[in-house]
Amino acid sequence: MTTDTSPRTFSRRSLLAGTAATVGALASVPLAGPALSQTQTGQPIEVLVLGAGMAGLTAALALQRRGHKVTVIERQGRIGGRLLSIPLGDGMFTEAGGGHFRSDMPLVLNYVRRFNLPLLSLNDGLPVYMVDGKTAKSADVTNWPWDLTAEERNVTVSANLNRYLFRAGLDTHTVLGPDWPDQDLLDRLDDITLEDLLRPVGASPAFLKLLAANAGLFTPYAQTLSIIPDLAYHFGDQNVFRIQGGNNRLPMAMANSLGRGNIVLDAQVTAIDQTGARIRVGTKGGKEFIGDAIVSTIPFSVMDEVEVTPRWSAGKARMIAEMEWDKTVKVIVKTQKPSWLTQNVRGWPMAGGDRPWERFIDITGNEPGGHGSGFFYLNGENADRVLAAPRDVRAQQVVDIFQQDLPGLLGDVVSVSDFAWSEQPWIRGSFGSTPIGGGWMVKEWTVPEGRIHFAGDFTTLKTGWVEGAIESGLRAARQIDPEARPLSGPR
Ligand SMILES: Cc1cc2nc3c(=O)[nH]c(=O)nc-3n(C[C@H](O)[C@H](O)[C@H](O)COP(=O)(O)OP(=O)(O)OC[C@H]3O[C@@H](n4cnc5c(N)ncnc54)[C@H](O)[C@@H]3O)c2cc1C
């Protein structure tokens, strides 16, 4: 067995199709080797990091800084995972994955600052809603045509939500803390949907529909535990940013800092064996790596393609099998101008409704180029409908429905395309989240499996957010070396 750490080029390549599934069944074999891989002797060890997304790169940098030898093994021919920027021409970029950061994301912003990356400012939402066949602008709050209660009238969706969360004993600040939730809250929020939480404290069905139009149609039916941090980001802070030239510049900067020779691309991990004194990792192309500890950021949605020896413990096998993954299709639109601004409509989101287009997000902000830029966000049945349509027309169909519903809002459309997350073989989904009653996973994902430590935004309640990915990478690094730190900024 050899450890291959030879430098690779970072060229894009077509994605490999998945291998035959090798499902890790319930464990019957006890794990060999030490329970934790941390160097009790204080000596540097060799760590294999699986996945070159934000979680993996965070862990790798933090461990390298402590003197450990780190090799990042990445399935794709590119760095960044779900930070994936796509050029739109005229110097503009859109984002297939992570699209924006907020000023209440200290870990992300500190890395952005550390690498001196320029930020664009975006507008937060001043949307138009189309719900139950009725249309109203968010700005015209006094004239909303829906059957809201007296106390829900004349205030925004955000203000209503924050009031209801307060009544339910929550708020959009505390829930973003690293130690949230405590056991009592976890037990309370585990078995209920957001609707179950908000209806008893006064939320009307009409308000819940508007909330869904703003935050995604799945929102009222999601498990409260996993949706609350998501709502806290969307409704707790109004300062929205992205990186000029593409959010993918952040993981690229981290990869450069790590040293490209420490990252092996086009290497799909298919086997992990930790029965021996050292861990062995095999890839689809026949490469083999040896190390003392693993940080795995491989999304659980594709973990069935990895053969682990010994098999996963019962808890890990159940968590991997039961975590729920969204599909999410983005329909990407470039327009001649951001003409919606003249109609007093803008931002994240710019339009929301119970329509097949679901939500349009305006990410133009102060990006140079002069054009308008945005994307439709489609999940669940809306994503299914797009995915079932012929590939060459499916994105345009979404735009056509929107143009009929809200004529003139987009102005002249220059280009339309789509990006479907369920079609990416390296993840086969967009966001992983805990199902109703899945609160037990919150502890499970923090417990290492022998010498394998888990990271990835899906191993946090900040799933679907880069802040969660970074938090998880630091957690895994500290399990290996308690002194591991980010490059700068808060712990
Ligand atoms: C549609 C969408 C919109 C989003 N919007 C936002 C947003 O506005 N703001 C925000 O902060 N976040 C957003 N996010 C979330 C953000 O993109 C993620 O939190 C973050 O990029 C996840 O990083 P990660 O390292 O945890 O996982 P990933 O980036 O998924 O990294 C996992 C890596 O593992 C690799 N891998 C998979 N299998 C193997 C294998 N067998 N062997 C080796 N490597 C493997 C993958 O190729 C990938 O590079 C969005 C995500 C999506 C999908």
Image (cartoon, grey):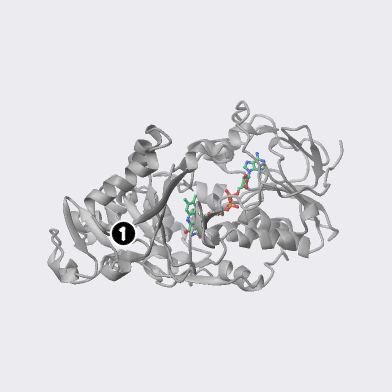
10 Å crowding of disc 1: few (<14), some (14-19), many (20+)? some
Residue 308 image-quadrant placement: top right
**Residue at x 66% of width, y 55% of height:** 476
Q: Is mark 1 within 8 Å of ligand 1?
A: no
Residue that mark 1 sits on: 411
Does residue 478 appear in this view? Answer: no
Q: Is 421 situated above or below 188?
A: above
Q: Is 25 situated above or below 182?
A: above
Secondary structure at badge 1 equals loop
**Residue at x 60% of width, y 32% of height:** 17
Residue nearest the observer in this picture, 270 or 333: 333
Q: Quadrant of the N terminus?
A: top right
Q: Position of residue 380 (x, y in %)?
A: 36, 41
Q: Is 376 situated above or below 110?
A: above
Does residue 384 appear in this view? Answer: yes
Tally of numbered tags: 1
Q: Position of residue 21 (x, y in %)?
A: 60, 27
Q: Quadrant of the C terminus?
A: bottom right
> In the visual, does 288 lie left or right of 421?
right
**Residue at x 19% of width, y 69% of height:** 141
**Residue at x 28% of width, y 50% of height:** 402
Amino acid carrying label 1: it is Gly
